[in-house]
């Protein structure tokens, strides 16, 4: 007999109030918010940067997997079953046979994807877990404005049928990389993904507008929303209330307050 307290799972992570729609999840996590602020600070360098990114993605991945992954019944005998036949954990947990792909977008997304991949292999049947790698960079015009994303190379599997696709990329600035990646996975590979989830440390209002306009079925999770170039009266409203007036990108499409070039800082490679 199952304990009725665990027959169903209603878990949802706490979120800040916003008006961006039900597919956007801006987490309300004071611990993660504090450590993310430390990650963004001018004085924070390697190796602390790497440790912070790893820890923050472990927390973000735990929230996403617990909230979005399919559930299944658990029946697990404990070590006490040898002396008590009732010593069986029964309830609802994550479905171990879930099919997943985590996509590492180089450079900033390489470590986050590996963190997610490691957790997936611990949680699920590893036979259904895959990690893909995309190599792309933002393309800009003569004035330095982002015009899209340029693909350099990719190492990816061909089948996405029924799989959850995860895109753990720290900075959601313009959305050009995620839009390009989503388009490729939806149109160039075999099958139809079950779900597409973008996982970011920071997003801007511009990112949310661009990604959801191009791919409205995308689910977005982020630890922080940055709209620091908005006017004071806009900042006084709940995020998304005056979405068209919100601004989180400077003239070169870098996030404000942001974190600087996370890919560069993670790799100590300033190119």
Image: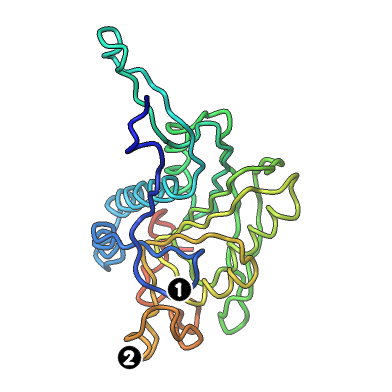
Neighbours of disc 2 within 10 Å: few (<14), some (14-19), many (20+): few
In this picture, residue 9 sits left or right of residue 104: left
Mark number, residue 232:
2
In this picture, residue 160 sits left or right of residue 221: right
Quadrant in the picture for the N terminus? top left
17 is higher (above) or lower (below) than 119? below
Quarter assignment of residue 177: bottom right
* Colouring mode (rainbow / by chain / secondary structure / one colour): rainbow
In this picture, residue 137 sits left or right of residue 268: right
116 is higher (above) or lower (below) than 251? above
153 is higher (above) or lower (below) than 80? below
Name the residue located 65 percent from the left edge and 56 percent from the top edge.
Answer: 152
Please state the total of marks drawn on the protein image. Answer: 2
**Viewer-side residue, 249 vs 3:** 3
Neighbours of disc 1 within 10 Å: few (<14), some (14-19), many (20+): many
Task: For residue 168, say whether it is visible.
Answer: yes
Task: For residue 44, say whether it is visible.
Answer: no
**Viewer-side residue, 73 vs 70:** 73
Q: CA distance from mark 1 to mark 2?
A: 16 Å
Name the residue located 58 percent from the left edge and 67 percent from the top edge.
Answer: 138
Mark number, residue 240:
none
Quarter assignment of residue 157: top right
**Viewer-side residue, 73 vs 203:** 73
Residue 197, position as x, y percentages in the image? 53, 55
Residue 244, position as x, y percentages in the image? 51, 86
Mark number, residue 204:
1
Please tell me whether mark 2 sits on a helix, a strand or a loop.
Answer: helix
Pointer 1 or 2: first along the chain: 1
Quarter assignment of residue 81: top left
Please tell me whether mark 1 sits on a helix, a strand or a loop.
Answer: loop
Most distant residue in the top direction? 82
């Amino acid at each position: 007999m199952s304990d009725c307290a665990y027959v169903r799972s209603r878990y949802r992570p706490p979120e800040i109030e916003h008006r961006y729609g039900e597919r956007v999840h801006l987490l309300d996590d004071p611990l993660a918010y504090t450590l993310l602020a430390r990650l963004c600070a001018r004085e924070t360098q390697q190796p602390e940067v790497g440790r912070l990114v790893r820890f923050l993605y472990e927390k973000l991945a735990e929230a996403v997997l617990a909230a979005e992954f399919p559930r299944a019944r658990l029946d697990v005998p404990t070590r006490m079953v040898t002396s008590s036949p009732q010593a069986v954990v029964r309830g609802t947990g994550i479905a171990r046979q879930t099919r997943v792909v985590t996509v590492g977008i180089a450079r900033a997304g390489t470590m986050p994807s590996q963190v997610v991949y490691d957790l997936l292999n611990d949680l699920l049947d590893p036979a259904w877990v895959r990690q893909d790698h995309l190599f792309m960079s933002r393309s800009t015009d003569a004035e330095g404005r982002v015009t899209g994303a340029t693909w350099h190379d990719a190492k990816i599997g061909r089948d996405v049928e029924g799989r959850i696709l995860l895109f753990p990329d720290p900075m959601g600035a313009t959305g050009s990389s995620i839009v390009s990646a989503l388009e490729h996975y939806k149109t160039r590979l075999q099958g139809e993904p079950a779900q597409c989830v973008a996982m970011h440390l920071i997003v801007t209002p511009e990112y949310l507008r661009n990604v959801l306009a191009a791919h409205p079925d995308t689910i977005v999770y982020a630890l922080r929303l940055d709209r620091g170039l908005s006017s004071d009266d806009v900042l006084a409203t709940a995020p998304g209330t005056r979405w068209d007036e919100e601004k989180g990108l400077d003239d070169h499409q870098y996030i404000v307050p942001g974190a600087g070039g996370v890919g560069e800082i993670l790799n100590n490679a300033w190119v």
